[in-house]
Image (tube, rainbow, N blue to C red):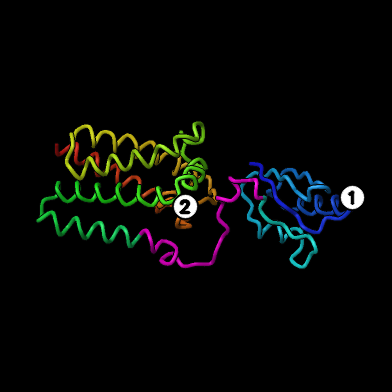
Amino acid sequence: MTHSYTVAGITCSSCVAKVKSKLLTHPDVLAAEVTLEEQKAVITMQKQVSIAELQQALGIDSKYKISADASDHENHTLIEVKQESWLTTYKPLLLIAFFITSVSIFTSHGNLHSGMNTFMAGFFLVFSFFKFLNLKGFAESYAMYDLLAIKIPVYGYIYPFIELALGISYLISFQPLITNWTALIVMSFSSLGVIQSVVNKKMIRCACLGAIFNLPMSTVTIVEDLLMVAMAALMLFMF
């Protein structure tokens, strides 16, 4: 992967050579091109290296200060590692899951099929809502890992509408067979990109709640997607 960065403090050709040599000391940096005029560094790395690590390679107290290049939109969606507890990180997702589950239980009156149908409706409606708050931001984040959005970026703009349609379909019990098959296929395919990203340990933003919350991609995201796949499959079996 290749990303561009702004490096403040480069004033001469000697600085260019020094910054380049220091960046190349990082074991995951494969190549680095540094320019004097633009004060930029284009870095090729075998796996994502955080800005904090790059700055450490340059020297914490160095006059050279590295930051993400504003033109590198993909790099802006990468997550810097923060020392936060698991509960703090996933609090928004856990609260949403709690509320949707509670409503599903209270309205199902002990009927498993009805409860799952309400849960699926709430899931798709709520998650699509957060994506619509910043559609462009979601599409850019989604294109970082979804296998179809990577090749066809416009799919990132279409996906929230698919979730909205599924949410409404579950809410009004529209063609249960078609709705469940669609959810099963869409969520199964979506989970492939998530699994690939987690296995490759990519430090990127999870776009499940759009670009509003800075949730990291992790096994939690895999569980979330596979849970929806399992529920759709179970509802098809019960149908």
Answer with left or right where residue 107 lies relative to residue 166.
Answer: left
Q: Amino acid at mark 2?
A: Ala
Q: Quadrant of the C terminus?
A: top left
Residue 80, how many percent across, how many down?
Answer: 58, 58
The image quarter containing residue 156 is top left
Answer with left or right where residue 141 lies relative to residue 133.
Answer: right
Q: Is residue 35 visible?
A: yes
Q: Which mark is residue 211?
A: 2
Q: Quadrant of the N terminus?
A: top right
The residue sitting at 17% across, 57% down in the picture is 105
The residue tagged with tag 1: helix, strand or loop? Answer: helix
Q: Which residues are magenta?
A: 70-93
Q: Amino acid at mark 1?
A: Ser
The residue sitting at 45% across, 63% down in the picture is 89
Q: Which residue is mark 1?
A: 13
- Residue 76 among those drawn in magenta: yes
Answer with left or right where residue 124 lies relative to residue 60.
Answer: left
Residue 222, how many percent across, how many down?
Answer: 39, 48
